[in-house]
Image (cartoon, rainbow, N blue to C red):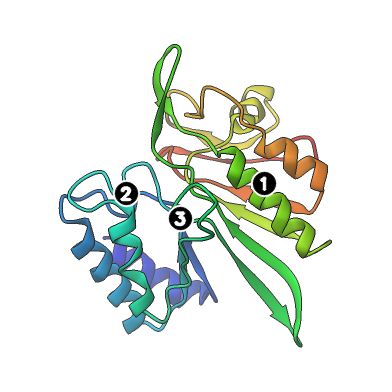
């Protein structure tokens, strides 16, 4: 069904790039599943980018092993990122026109889960990732950013609760980290991030403007 939907989207939209915001590999043999998906994209000659979700790498193969699969597929625009940045899918894709970067796509690894004082809950974007975001934004000066990650930021829940969002919430709530690590605030201060996109909540589908 997934492949049929993608083929339909390719025919109707003809995208230049497909971005998967995690949970592609909820399987005990996730490496085989990843290779199958990558081969599908190669056969259709479609470029794609990928950030890890909380279920990717939970079974036989960890994230490092999965990340090592993708370099052999030319249409997979993927990188594990800088060694000093926590995560296995923190990287940028520059969109160039006539030799000049006019926009950039930022992929951020939102990890799996963490233990809070109240128990186990969704993980968040860590300080090294936020420092890397600031570093990249500074290096690209005023180039507009679009950020992609799996687990939604706490601000997503605030947007929905404000009543200003457009769309639907089929899950019982917006499943966000229980603590705010400050990525959204960093984006506000930098002022070059135009929009963010997340996965994780399978039945939630909404959008809106927050602090913009």
Report which residue position mark 2 lands on: 56
The reply, left or right, for residue 40 in relation to residue 78 is left
Q: Dot 3, crowdedness within 10 Å: few (<14), some or many (≥20)?
A: many
Pick out the residue farthest to the top.
Answer: 118
The residue lying toward the viewer, choosing from 131 and 97, is 131
* Quadrant in which residue 117 is drawn: top left
Q: Determine whether label 2 and label 3 are within 8 Å by CB.
A: no
Give the x, y percent position of residue 12: 48, 73
Viewer-proximal residue among 212 and 68: 68
Alpha carbon distance from label 1 to label 3: 18 Å
Earlier residue among tags 2 and 1: 2
Of helix, strand and loop, which one carries label 3?
A: loop
The answer to whether marks 1 and 3 mark residues whose Cβ atoms lie closer than 8 Å is no
> In what element is the residue under mark 1?
helix
Among the two numbered marks 1 and 3 on one chain, the one whose residue lies closer to the N terminus: 3
Mark 1, residue position: 131
Q: Quadrant of the C terminus?
A: top right
Residue 182 is situated, as x and y percent measured from the top left of the image, at 67, 33
**Place of residue 208 in the rendered image (x, y in percent of width and height, measured from the top left):** 68, 40
Q: Which residue is mark 3?
A: 51
């Amino acid at each position: 069904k997934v492949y049929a939907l993608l083929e339909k989207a390719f025919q109707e939209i003809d995208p230049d790039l497909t971005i998967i915001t995690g949970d592609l590999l909820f399987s005990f043999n996730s490496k085989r599943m990843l290779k199958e998906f990558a081969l599908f994209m190669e056969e259709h000659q479609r470029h794609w980018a990928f950030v890890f979700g909380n279920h990717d790498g939970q079974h036989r193969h960890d994230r490092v092993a999965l990340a090592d699969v993708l370099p052999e597929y030319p249409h997979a625009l993927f990188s594990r990122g800088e060694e000093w940045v926590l995560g296995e899918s923190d990287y940028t894709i520059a969109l160039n026109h006539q030799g000049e970067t006019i926009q950039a796509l930022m992929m951020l690894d939102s990890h799996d889960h963490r233990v809070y004082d109240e128990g186990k809950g969704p993980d968040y974007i860590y300080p090294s990732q936020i420092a890397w975001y600031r570093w990249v934004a500074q290096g690209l000066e005023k180039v507009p950013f679009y950020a992609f990650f799996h687990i939604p930021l706490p601000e997503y829940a605030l947007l929905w609760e404000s009543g200003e969002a457009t769309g639907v919430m089929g899950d019982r709530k917006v499943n966000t980290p229980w603590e705010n690590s400050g990525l959204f605030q960093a984006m506000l201060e930098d002022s070059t991030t135009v929009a963010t996109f997340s996965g994780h909540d399978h039945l939630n589908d909404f959008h809106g403007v927050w602090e913009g």
